[in-house]
Amino acid sequence: MTFLRSKVVLALAVIPALLLATAADAHKLRAKGVKVAVAESTLSVTPSRDWNRLSARIGKNTESWTLDGGQLNDVTFYGGIAPGNPLVKERSKKKEPLPKFTGTTLLVEVPELLETTYRAYRQIGAFAVNSTEPVKFLGQDGVRFTYTYTDGDELTRKGEARAVIIKGNLYMITFDAPRLHYFDRTISDFHALVDTASFG
Amino acid sequence: MFRKIALGGAAAVLCSMAVPVTAQEKSAAKQGFELTANSNKKILVFRPSVRVGAQSTGGVFEPNAEWTERAKANIQAALEKFQRKLGNEVIIAPEAYGDDARNLQEHMVLFSAISQAVIEYQFFAGNRLPTKKRDNKAEVFDWSMGTGVADLPGAKDADYALFIYNKDAYGSTGRKVLQILAAIGPGIPVTSGEHLGFAGLVDLRTGDLLWLNADGQMGGDVREVDGSEKRVQQLLEDFPGSVPAKVAAK
Amino acid sequence: MKRYGAAIVSAWAATMAIPAAAQIAPLPPPYVGAYQPQGVDEIGIWREDDEAERKLAASTLVIQDEKLTFYVRRVLCDTVGTDRCKSVRIYILREPTFNATMVANGTMRVYSGLLLRLRNEAELGAILGHEFGHYEQRHSVNDFKARRAATDILMWGALLASMAPSYDVRRSYGNLELSIYGGFFRYNRDQEREADLLGIGYLNKSALRPHAASDVWRNVMGEIEASARVKGLKKPNFNAIAFTASHPPEAERAAMMAALADPAGRSREDGADRYREAMAAWLPIFLEDQVKLNDFGASEYLIQSLAESGWTATLWFARGELYRLRGHPRDLVNAAEFYQSAVQLDPALANAHRGLGLSLLKTARPSEGQASLRKYLELKPEASDAGMIRLMLPKEGAPN
């Protein structure tokens, strides 16, 4: 048998978009102490240290920051995903649809939404949601959840996220990093960041 | 002439982005790190990753075990000779099994990801992170694998660990690859034959990356003893302590 | 169907230069003992495979379950014989796609997605036997030599994808050096036919029902069609899909396998019960891996297919999850029914109560929903989302 996995066929289609995305824009500095809006939304944060904003965007109303490179630490902001939309841009709406945030998605189901998005997008088999707890976020009742997964580069990563649904839209900030050294190293910087999250 | 970058760490990269020579970093060392000659430091080497083969017309990498074995032996010998000149001892890491093997593997994968990040976000001029750009200006090289390295097999008996990756493909051009790539993303040059060399030195007490050398265009035919010595020389170019009184990052 | 099958076999037989009179697959040649690689190419490939295996053995994605691995090995040995299976090392990977590979040095990788989709030992034997056929005929070496002349666009696709600058969007094949997936071999159709022939030959000789082989392919195709249908895509052109393009056309293949199977073997057992028992602990996990891939049509087809031998709480639960996760209004109503069926069969299945509770809440049945969620917490007070669920329940006795 030994056939290629279907994702290989699709890999070729990804390349042009990626190359275009990173062609012109440089990554931008997000300076310590300077309040800044993120993810093309009214969501803003004030970094407690210098961060870098990655130029490539994985979807409308998303933005990713890093200290050392996305593969080592990645904070992603989801600034108001509206019902009917996936979390990130689909490679192909028809052939590779991603799970959608809906008008009936409950806060307790948001971790599953992230999980299924990661599993479908990265075609991975090993993903576990480790904890799901209530937390105040952006002034409202939100959810804090943690997770672990092994990605296609064979690195096992840990993740932590905050999410809340406000006026029917999903606001979420996630932090992903390898479980070896990198997650623990930056988790408090991530906490400092989300604590400053606000509207306007 | 375009200089190749080993994008994606130890991924089998067969093409590269076009970048001017002058803007390329090739190696860097942690600020203030010095490895003085004859300091009798012990350097642990994990199963060196060496692949030698031929790159055929279609770009298929044809592994050649005889070449690889020879290259491995040559590189090993050249490594030891080089290190002895510096006055450091090279220890080959013991074989690991079970959980130890899995832990080592995860560290190898992490090292690969870190090296990849260094190249993509600090070395590669077109893609530098602003904070890394600043680091470059201040001659800061701040990357780490974490203190977990102290538990790797053989770590207790050594001061530093050397990760080596070396892939050579000798041979003819990848014409077809060129055509596909041209169709997908015009302007991406492809060089034929591939000589990726990649070496990193990690402090086994702190996990800090003391030195990294990434070179996508190395010389020396590793199938020959002289070539291997040259290759090791290149891999370990600017190895700390090898050139006295040299400042850290290039 | 028989006439069609015979026509296919003789047409196929003509290309393989096998006399049409020899309708069933011949018995495999006698085993010649441990083989050592010869020649530069072969030694090179074995060495690469050996290196890959070292990394595979240390990978986090390998399922470290002795019982499961031992079972798969037993089925391989039952199929190809203990002489042959001695040289094989089997690794089961947590990877939701349908695939199994075997490389030149005897490393066999079986993906969890494959184990999920098979229904009995005969089917598993058919796959493993087929893979073993490639190995015994040293197809990877021969193919490697042939492939030098051809461009494998899809292989480059994988490598190109690894070049993508942003980690987030990268479909990372990662470091080929460290990759545990082994080489992306694409055998040609004749080699696939040869492996099929050998595979059925093994099955004919074994105690398992050889006709199972064709069932596997019919199900694979059915799943692909179901997936495409739900996505609103055209009926798939199997010649354009990588893995089918590299194999003989499915209709031909299914028919050929049925024809090659020894008729005397028709009454042999499938080992379905033994297979289900061996997979029991892992089925819920593999199902979850599949459902969460967001391929509704494929998952629905699979669940229905598994349910042919009887609906279980696990299957109803998986179906409930599938519908709830898609979450259209009608889906939620259906999901509630499926979860209901699950808890009827297994009242202690805590997660089914959770799914039921959430689905009822979302379809305007709050008090029933809350009752189910309470049941969930009762059964699983230590649940990782207990805190959130509790917040959704009014205090006992308080008005809604």
Image: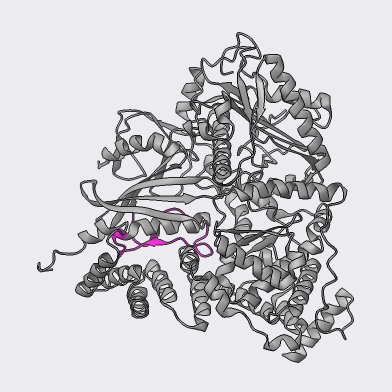
Q: Residue at x 56, y 14 (%)?
A: B34
The answer to whether B14 is drawn above or below residue B224 in the figure is below
- x, y (%) of residue A33? 30, 28
Q: Per the image, is C88 magenta?
A: no
What quarter of the picture does the C terminus of chain C occupy?
bottom left
Q: Quadrant of the N terminus of chain C?
A: bottom right
The answer to which of C170 and A25 lies nearer the viewer is C170
* Scheme of image coloration: one colour
Q: Which residue is painted at 88% across and 49% down in the image? A: C39
Residue B109 relative to residue B64: left or right: left
Please name whichever residue, C14 or B204, is drawn nearer the observer in this view of the structure: B204
The region drawn magenta spans: A81-108
What residue sits 26% from the left and 39% below the top?
A195
Describe residue A141's horizontal placement relative to residue C290 as left or right.
left
- What kind of secondary structure does the magenta stretch mostly adopt? loop
Q: Is residue B149 visible?
A: yes
